Amino acid sequence: MNTYAEAGPRPAGDVDGGEYDVVVVGGGAAGLAGAMALARARRSVLVVDAGQPRNAPAEGIHVYLGSEGTSPARFLARGRAEVAAYGGEVVAGRVEAVERRAEGGFRVAVAGGFSVGARRLLLATGLVDELPPVPGLAERWGRDVLHCPYCHGYEVRDQAIGVVATGPMSVHQALLWRQWSADVVLFTNGVLEVGAEDAERLAARGIAVVEGEVAAVETEADRLSGVRLADGRTVARQALAVAAPGRARTDVPAGLDLPLTEVVRNGHVMGTQVSADPMGATGVPGVWVAGNVTNVVEQVIGAAAAGVRAGAAINADLIEEDTEAAVAAYRADPLSARGEAEAGARVLGDSRHGL
């Protein structure tokens, strides 16, 4: 049984050639929560973790009851240890390809020449934020360049906040961030035209609008200090908000023709996500998804909940398959199957009598 905590996942080579009920691709909140549900259901489960969590730069995760403020690294280490305590396995590696086997299930290829078998797959690969090509912006992402006020707004409350426009939804974003600070500036960044009605709404909330393309993000003493415009002006800011579209990580693994949907709200492209039902089942038989890969706006606590739902759905699906196999065996050899059932009944009876 794996009981590691802070040490992290084991090397992928440790499980080369193994067979599992479920392989989980992605070791974030969704993947680990799904693995936990499956391990507690007494399924053999392997999590393959590429070690690229989206929230790695953040100081802490928020709005997660019981884990408020916990660093992403510590949160995931605790999750890995909890999965391992129930017999689940977590290894470090990058799933490169998946192929369907003629006998059923999948062959999962991991970088380095390793492979494992799986009856079912749970993809929790997350998404990639597609940031505007502004020099200095990506380096501050997750620190003082932020996307979600519910995740990070309280940490920059009452500071000078700038909203870098990426589309029509940026007006709403500026009004949203106004809840956390009275000093909010909306940078149109050459991609947003503020109409008369929106201009009035912004002015009524005391939100200034700065026209012009953003040329760079400036820092001082490793902290964001301002926004430099293409015309040379600099506007002092302590934090920036950017509504960056998120692209589902469907290139990992290759070999699965997953159905993608573009998410558009009020004319703004939020990103892409894998289409799935409420329990995470995709249009590809045997494949489930959970977390940001199927919901671009999901927070950590929601991703974990989605992982649990998907894990339960996968277990239910496997139960159906196990039952069908048991019925087929029963029909082929009812005496043998009846003997096994009677043996089970005797064990149950003995336990009831304390024997």
Image (spheres, rainbow, N blue to C red):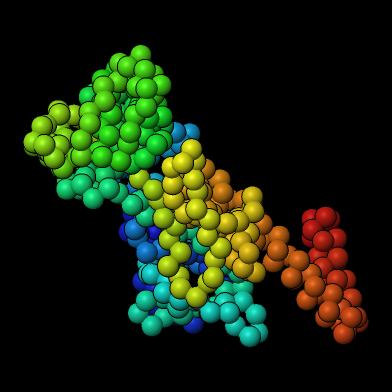
Asked if residue 333 is positioned above or below residue 84 in the image, the reply reads below
Q: Quadrant of residue 16?
A: bottom left
Q: Residue at the location (63% across, 59% down)?
A: 281
Q: Quadrant of the C terminus?
A: bottom right
Q: Residue at the location (88% across, 71% down)?
A: 342
Q: Quadrant of residue 195?
A: top left
Q: Horizontal and vertical percent for residue 17?
A: 49, 82
Q: Quadrant of residue 187?
A: top left
Asked if residue 185 is positioned above or below residue 229 in the image, the reply reads above
Asked if residue 69 is positioned above or below residue 297 in the image, the reply reads above
Q: Horizontal and vertical percent for residue 194?
A: 34, 29
Q: Nearer the viewer, residue 18 or 207?
A: 207
Left/right placement of residue 59 relative to residue 168 reads left
* Residue furthest top as drawn: 204
Q: Residue at the location (69% across, 66% down)?
A: 318
Q: Is residue 296 visible?
A: yes
Q: Is residue 59 visible?
A: no
* Residue furthest front as drawn: 196
Q: Horizontal and vertical percent for residue 248?
A: 44, 57
Q: Nearer the viewer, residue 42 or 105?
A: 105
Count of numbered marks: 0
Left/right placement of residue 20 relative to residue 250 reads right
Q: Residue at the location (27% across, 48% down)?
A: 132
Q: Nearer the viewer, residue 23 or 132?
A: 132
